Image: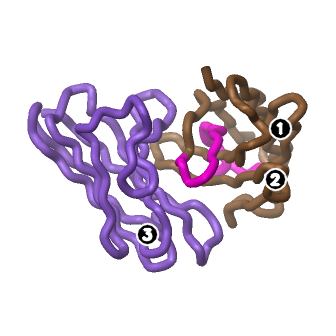
Amino acid sequence: QSVLTQPPSASGTPGQRVTISCSGSSSNIGSNSVYWYQQLPGTAPKLLIYRNNQRPSGVPDRFSGSKSGTSASLAISGLRSEDEADYYCAAWDDSLSGWVFGGGTKLTVL
Amino acid sequence: EVQLVESGGGLVKPGRSLRLSCTASGFSFGDYTMSWFRQAPGKGLEWVGFIRSKTYGGTTEYAASVKGRFTISRDDSKSIAYLQMNSLKTEDTAVYYCTRERFEWGFDPWGHGTLVTVSS
């Protein structure tokens, strides 16, 4: 059971906007930054969003992050077939003194 | 180009030890916290632990699941981070990734990972 809660799956058609939620608590999302990672099939994770809503250079602006209270979300607009991947949210947990993750959301582009 | 390359994975029997290495290049290794993560087959990501830079004391933190069995160290002169894994259990079977982090910029990049299989 993951500390952060994500839906196991999400889907959309090309061009659509999809959002993936991530729910936590006051000890993690409520008091620390949220990060999002994309893992394409058979590859290592890649940083997508840092500090709740910042994009590293090279990440398209189709990807955006937001945070409110103890929840966060990742939005992907203009969905493309190459966005089909697993997406993970992460945050530092003050109570556990460690990094915690969501269980991952498998995004399917129909 | 920033690069992280893990090595040292393989098949090991329960109760035995294994040491993984993470060789870094393309950046000032000593300035970064180095972290290890793992991913069991078909499962999600799990944080294993990290070692801070010498600037922040070079101290370590570990996940509860590995505390007391795993040890992270670093050799800044060689730009290598190590993960010493003792008393291995079948549930430690996973792909192990190393990555770097600083100033809340997130874990970026990640190495390609090295597979550790614990089985009799």
- Which label number is shown at residue A29? 3
- Image quadrant of residue B31? top right
- Whether residue A47 sits left or right of residue B51 in the image: it is left
Q: Residue at x 54, y 48 (%)?
A: B105
- Image quadrant of residue A11? top left
Sequence order check, earlier mark of 2 and 1: 1
Q: Position of residue A61 (x, y in %)?
A: 27, 37
* Chain coloured brown here: B
Query: Residue under mark 2: which chain is it in?
Result: B
Marks 2, 3: nearer the viewer:
2
Q: Colour of chain A?
A: purple
Q: Which residues are magenta?
A: B88-106
- Say what amino acid the circle numbered 1 marks: Arg
Q: From where the camera sits, is residue B10 visible?
A: no
The residue that mark 1 highlights is B19
Q: Residue at x 32, y 49 (%)?
A: A105
The residue that mark 2 highlights is B55
Q: Is residue A11 magenta?
A: no
Q: From where the camera sits, is residue A34 visible?
A: yes
- Whether residue A33 sits left or right of residue A55 in the image: it is right
Disc 2 versus disc 1: distance between alpha carbons? 25 Å
